[in-house]
């Protein structure tokens, strides 16, 4: 089987300006932050990010690399409002496609199934249809004739996800209690890259948790990156919880340009190894 | 038994619990402290069949006190986000959400303040509000009833109200129900011919004028005013057990 192990920088090598990136996890939970940091180092710009948004969207707003965000929410969970995202929205520095969370899921599923859209009631009657004039409704072809929202597929160029464990060929394991929708991000993407806390043998992977925890299979990903602490500062249970102190420091960096520049210099203008050392101290 | 007097927060919690009366075997998702406490009170007293999570992904067989981590013996099932979406589309759910703004037909906004294109304040985003409101029963909790929260027109319709639902026609609106709005001043419903918000009961000690002055639209006021029930000493004792730290007491503006 193909050995897909690679470095973080290799995983972002194909990302070009203007691309659409899907990012797994949920809010401030199991986000592939080491890959987000690699995107910051690479400096690609005019990105569109499709995400159940957390600090992934926030950081790329703060670095000015994000042109457009597609989301149902952007939150740090324990800090409900993502301050960098708020700032970008309030300064009109960001194009936004705001969807109902369930519509967002159907958009991912449509992309994964290679369908143009999937129908739902979610969105009907709300201003989601008003703020997204590209969204259309569809009439049921059956007797009921019901009018439904046709959620367009959320196709992405590249997807990034973070798992607890993986093997070298790209089988991935989520050991926490919620798999979120990471497999769908991979399937909605032309290419998907998976970081993980630890790369283990396939035997160890299979014996390391219930079979249901093997939520990603090797067809879905073209690169595997061992990145211990790769979800920091978001939670990656059961390996570690959210680093709340660090998250507060991150949130406080939205105060002004000076605060952000200091945060950026301290934590983002360095290699992943240096980052992990900086947050450990 | 408890010798304590009921507080306004206790009255609010009981009013929240009453929103779930008759719901039976469905999932309750209660966002925020008072909704969470009220749902637990309902499960513990008169709606034992309700399904409730730990706020993450475990279904719990017991109503635990706020802040207590569930142990294995408290778990009865699994409800990750994927299953939450399946459940809400299935309709077997009653959600109680907050509302940064809510209008006379129950349209709710949690997305932003000001025009969506250029918000003065970006809030959470619509989250699941559009899908929740069109698929199953919804109630709202507003801990600080004022004319900035209860407004003539919300800035962005996140949760769908009765006028918007009616405009969809009978098919689109058939699963839509906004059951109650509970605030720190009273309880409100939409049991009026055109589904305008109606004062259902005033919390003890609240004057009608106070509600009128703090509401940014014209409420339907019934001829005879009801008072929200005050929890009995037995219920107060249950509430103290369910919220030993008094989190709910801090959430309610008096």
Image: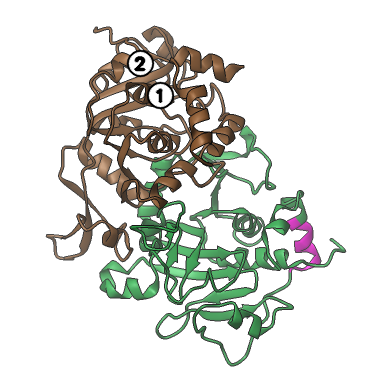
Q: Position of residue A146 (x, y in %)?
A: 20, 64
Q: Which residue is mark 2?
A: A8
Tell me the chain of label 1: A
Q: CA distance from mark 2 to mark 1?
A: 9 Å
Colour in which the image shows chain B: green
- In reply to whether residue A277 is colored magenta, the answer given is no
Crowd tier of the residue under label 2, counting other residues whose Cα lies within 10 Å: few below 14, some 14–19, many 20 or above: many
Marks 2,1: beta carbons within 8 A: yes
Considering every residue shown, the one lying at the far front of the view is A258
- When asked about the image quadrant of residue B250, the answer is bottom right
Magenta-tinted stretch: B231-239
Q: Which secondary structure is most common in the magenta stretch?
A: helix
Tell me the chain of label 2: A
Considering every residue shown, the one lying at the far bottom of the view is B223
Disc ID at residue A37: 1
Task: Identify the secondary structure beneath mark 1.
Answer: helix
- In reply to whether residue B235 is colored magenta, the answer given is yes
Q: Position of residue B220 (x, y in %)?
A: 51, 86
Crowd tier of the residue under label 1, counting other residues whose Cα lies within 10 Å: few below 14, some 14–19, many 20 or above: many
Q: Which chain is brown?
A: A
Looking at the rendering, in which quadrant would you find the C terminus of chain B?
bottom right
| Residue positioned 49% across, 24% down in the render | A265
- Which label lies toward us, 2 or 1? 1
Task: Identify the secondary structure beneath mark 2.
Answer: helix
- Residue B15 in sight in this render: yes
Q: Tell me: B241 left or right of A58.
A: right
């Amino acid at each position: 089987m193909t050995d897909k192990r690679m470095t973080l920088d290799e995983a972002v090598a194909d990302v070009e300006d203007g691309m659409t990136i899907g990012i797994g996890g949920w809010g401030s939970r199991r986000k592939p932050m080491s890959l987000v940091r690699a995107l910051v180092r690479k400096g690609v710009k005019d990105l569109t990010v499709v995400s159940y948004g957390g600090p992934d969207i926030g950081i790329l707003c703060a670095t000015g690399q994000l042109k457009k965000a597609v989301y149902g929410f952007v939150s740090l969970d324990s800090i409900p409002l993502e301050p960098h995202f708020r700032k970008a929205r309030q300064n009109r520095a960001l194009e936004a496609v705001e969807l109902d969370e369930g519509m967002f899921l159907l958009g991912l599923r449509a992309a994964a199934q290679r369908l143009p859209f999937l129908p739902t009631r979610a969105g009907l009657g709300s201003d989601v249809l008003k703020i997204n004039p590209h969204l259309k409704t569809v009439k049921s072809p059956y007797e009921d004739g019901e009018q439904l929202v046709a959620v367009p597929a959320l196709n992405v160029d590249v997807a990034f996800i973070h798992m607890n464990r993986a093997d070298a060929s790209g089988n991935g394991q989520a050991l926490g209690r919620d798999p979120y929708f990471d497999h769908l991000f991979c399937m909605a993407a032309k290419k998907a890259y998976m970081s993980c806390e630890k790369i283990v043998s396939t035997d160890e992977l299979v014996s390391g948790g219930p079979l249901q925890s093997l939520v990603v299979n090797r067809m879905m990903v073209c690169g595997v990156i061992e990145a211990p602490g790769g979800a920091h500062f978001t939670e990656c249970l059961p390996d570690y919880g959210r680093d709340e102190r660090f998250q507060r420091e991150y949130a406080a960096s939205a105060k002004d340009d000076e605060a952000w520049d200091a945060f950026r210099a301290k934590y983002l203008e360095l290699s992943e190894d240096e980052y992990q050392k900086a947050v450990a101290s | 038994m408890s010798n304590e007097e009921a507080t306004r927060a206790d009255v609010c919690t009981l009013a929240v619990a009453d929103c779930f009366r008759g719901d039976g075997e469905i999932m309750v998702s209660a966002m925020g402290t008072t909704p969470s406490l009220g749902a637990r009170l309902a499960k513990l007293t008169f709606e034992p069949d309700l399904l409730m999570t730990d706020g993450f992904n475990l279904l719990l067989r017991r109503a635990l006190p706020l802040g207590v981590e569930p142990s294995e013996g408290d778990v009865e099932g699994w409800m990750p986000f994927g299953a939450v979406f399946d459940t809400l589309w299935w309709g077997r759910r009653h959600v109680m959400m907050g509302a940064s703004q809510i209008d006379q037909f129950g349209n709710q906004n949690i997305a932003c303040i000001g025009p969506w294109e250029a918000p003065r304040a970006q809030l959470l985003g619509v989250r699941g509000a559009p899908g929740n409101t069109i698929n199953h029963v919804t109630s709202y909790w507003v801990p600080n009833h004022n004319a900035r929260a209860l407004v003539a027109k919300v800035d962005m319709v996140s949760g769908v109200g009765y006028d918007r639902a009616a405009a969809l026609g009978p098919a689109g609106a058939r699963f839509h129900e906004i059951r109650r709005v509970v605030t720190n001043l009273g309880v409100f419903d939409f049991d009026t011919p055109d589904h305008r918000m109606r004062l259902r009961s005033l919390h003890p000690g609240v004057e009608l004028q106070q509600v009128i002055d703090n509401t940014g639209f014209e409420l339907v006021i019934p001829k005879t005013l009801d008072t929200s029930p005050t929890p009995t000493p037995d219920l107060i004792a249950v509430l103290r057990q369910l919220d030993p730290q008094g989190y709910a007491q801090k959430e309610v503006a008096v």
